[in-house]
Amino acid sequence: MRKDGRRFGRPADPHTPPAEPTGTINTTDHDSRIVRTQGQPASQGYNAQAAVNEEQIVIAAEVTVDSPDFGHLEPMVKATIEELEGIGASESPGVVVADPGYWHQQQLERVINRGVQVVIPPDSGRRKGTRPGWDKGLYAFMRRVLSTEHGQAV
């Protein structure tokens, strides 16, 4: 560099984009992404979340491009509560039931701290035994809850 802050040599060449882009482009839906489901081939699409009541009526729904369900528990509970408040419902969800893909311990604890009971199996049905390191604390507690008659009923 010179004393006045300019670089030695000539300026950089301007960027020229290629005539044809490299890779694959979805020309029909620019917002969709490659989503993966365990045991299935990857596909172009979205990840939809739905919160339903005990009669299977949809209370809240969200569509994202984030492939795993991990991390969607708390936002869906929040969306459900907001929807219920929006229609003037006096009751909040008392229990949230979800599949193992929604297990996110920090979010689970925050939902419980809001006064909502959460029932999520820490292990998927395909797994034989517990995950390494997932045998104490909240994991063990949830397994005990699910082994009870009440836990099975929920």
Image (cartoon, grey):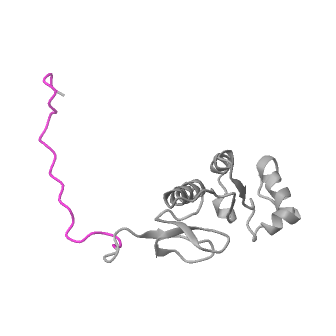
In the depicted structure, whether residue 153 falls above or below residue 137 = below
**In the displayed structure, does residue 154 sit left or right of residue 31?**
right
Task: Please tell me whether the stretch drawn in magenta is mainly helix, strand or loop.
Answer: loop
- The residue depicted at 59 percent of the width and 73 percent of the height is 57
Q: Position of residue 70 (x, y in %)?
A: 60, 58
Quarter holding the N terminus is top left
Is there any visible trace of residue 145 in the rendered image?
A: yes
**In the displayed structure, does residue 34 sit left or right of residue 4?**
right
- The residue depicted at 14 percent of the width and 30 percent of the height is 6
- The residue depicted at 54 percent of the width and 70 percent of the height is 36
Q: Outermost residue, top direction?
A: 3
- The residue depicted at 65 percent of the width and 53 percent of the height is 104
Is there any visible trace of residue 133 in the rendered image?
A: no
- Please give the range of residues in magenta: 2-25
Q: Position of residue 4 (x, y in %)?
A: 13, 24
Residue 126 on the magenta span: no
Residue 9 on the magenta span: yes
In this view, the residue in front, 84 or 27, is 84
Q: Position of residue 42 (x, y in %)?
A: 52, 74
Q: Position of residue 44 (x, y in %)?
A: 45, 75
**In the displayed structure, does residue 37 sit left or right of residue 22?**
right
In this view, the residue in front, 154 or 108, is 154
In this view, the residue in front, 61 or 105, is 61
In the depicted structure, whether residue 135 falls above or below residue 9 = below
Quarter holding the C terminus is bottom right
